[in-house]
């Protein structure tokens, strides 16, 4: 594997998952997270997930310990200087991401590859801000990262084909199937998934079908592991609203990107889904109550 040392910036749900699969694949991983509480919670999540995989015999106890030993934690970007690949998974704020990549551009070795796990922003804008667009790519993972088998490799105009190949090889090394996706809203998966989730909400909003019937329809009728309303709760109503509001602002004439009123009002009321314990369903930790 050409990529031996991986930096992950941000240790929330996605960052911790990306760090976990990178370390499990044999890379040294430096996790950079400014908020101590988020860093500690992220590491508890990584440990919990690895132990769960041991209990399910998907990992041996030795592999679990070896994986944990490959991590180091930091609160300083300078500690990412010698990483071969730096993956950004901070909160979805374009200006913050651009400023992070501008700083990393001055810190990391010139041959390092930069990647963003953004689900909603154009890769090209961050690539330009980094000062090394030819070595910048989108690497979009799916939640929960340790279990979901896909990564989207997002190609923008300025990236070199060599970096695309290295990103695909990295995706394979961390146990994912990599697909090539365009630098357009939602790439491939969210471009199809988000309109589906929103249409499910609109059906419920119009009173066409109940929450339960929409979900049962798509689980039993189409074989989806979770119905769209459950999935919306699982991903987070705020996350989905944030994505679609950004697209709506950029493409106001596309009716698929129109945020449903009920989604806005639920988020305003703090009903965010799994993370707040209440969305369309009630949640008890990671399970629907
Ligand atoms: N690490 C290790 N184990 C985990 C885990 C993790 N991170 N998350 C869950 N598990 C375990 C559970 O604890 C559970 O263990 P037990 O059987 O011992 O209880 C086991 O995996 C199976 O989980 P569930 O019981 O919840 O059952 P499941 O069979 O439904 O599997 C799932 C869970 C893989 C999440 C499945 O429901 C699924 O594929 N759901 C769809 C998820 C999806 O679509 N994700 C994409 C979201 S969109 C996105 O991420 C992009 C974006 O930009 C917004």
Image (cartoon, grey):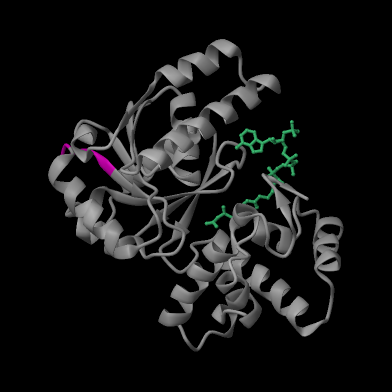
In the image, taking residue 256 as reference, residue 74 lies left or right, namely left
Give the quadrant of residue 94: bottom left
Considering only vertical position in the picture, is 153 above or below 259? above
**In percent of the image, x 52 and y 73: which residue is there?**
244
Instruction: Please indicate, yes or no, whether residue 4 appears anywhere in the rendered image.
Output: yes
Residue furthest out toward the left: 106
**In percent of the image, x 44 and y 31: which residue is there?**
22
Dominant secondary structure (helix, strand or loop) of the stretch shown in magenta: loop
Q: Which residues are magenta?
A: 109-113
Q: Is residue 183 magenta?
A: no
**In percent of the image, x 50 and y 65: which residue is there?**
186
Quarter of the displayed picture in which ligand 1 can be seen: top right
Expressed as whole percent of the image width and height from the top left, the position of residue 66 reads: 47, 15
Give the quadrant of residue 281: bottom right
Q: How many marks?
A: 0
Residue furthest out toward the bottom: 253
Expressed as whole percent of the image width and height from the top left, the position of residue 238 reads: 54, 65
- The quarter in which the N terminus is drawn is top left
In the image, taking residue 140 as reference, residue 78 lies left or right, namely left
**In percent of the image, x 70 and y 74: which residue is there?**
201
Residue furthest out toward the top: 62
Expressed as whole percent of the image width and height from the top left, the position of residue 99 reads: 22, 57
Considering only vertical position in the picture, is 276 above or below 38? below
In the image, taking residue 115 as reference, residue 182 lies left or right, namely right
Considering only vertical position in the picture, is 82 above or below 230? above
Q: Looking at the image, which is closer to me, 276 or 230? A: 276
Q: Looking at the image, which is closer to me, 193 or 159? A: 193
Expressed as whole percent of the image width and height from the top left, the position of residue 151 reads: 51, 46
């Amino acid at each position: 594997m050409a990529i031996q040392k991986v930096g992950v910036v941000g240790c929330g749900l996605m960052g911790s998952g990306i760090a976990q699969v990178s370390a499990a694949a044999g890379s040294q991983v430096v996790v950079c997270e400014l908020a101590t509480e988020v860093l500690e919670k992220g590491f508890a999540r990584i440990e919990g997930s690895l132990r769960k995989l041991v209990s399910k015999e998907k990992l041996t106890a030795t592999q679990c310990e070896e994986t944990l030993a490959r991590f180091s934690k930091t609160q300083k970007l300078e500690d990412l200087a010698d990483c071969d690949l730096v993956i950004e998974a901070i909160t979805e704020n374009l200006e913050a991401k651009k400023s992070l990549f501008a700083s990393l551009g001055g810190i990391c070795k010139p041959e390092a590859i930069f990647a963003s796990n953004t689900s909603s922003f154009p890769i090209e804008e961050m690539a330009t801000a980094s000062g090394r667009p030819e070595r910048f790519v989108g690497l979009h993972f799916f939640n929960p990262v340790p279990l979901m088998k896909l990564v989207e490799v997002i190609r923008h105009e300025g990236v070199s084909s060599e970096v695309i190949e290295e990103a695909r090889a990295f995706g394979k090394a961390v146990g994912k199937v990599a697909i090539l996706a365009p630098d357009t809203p939602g790439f491939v998966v969210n471009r199809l998934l988000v309109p589906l989730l929103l249409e499910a909400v609109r059906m419920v909003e119009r009173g066409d079908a109940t929450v339960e019937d929409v979900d049962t329809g798509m689980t039993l009728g189409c074989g989806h592991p979770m119905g769209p309303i459950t999935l919306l709760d699982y991903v987070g109503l705020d996350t989905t609203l944030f994505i679609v509001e950004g697209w709506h602002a950029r493409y106001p004439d596309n009716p698929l990107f129109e945020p449903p009123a009920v989604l806005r009002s639920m988020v305003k009321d703090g009903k965010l889904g799994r993370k707040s314990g209440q969305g369309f369903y009630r949640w008890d930790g990671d399970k629907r109550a």
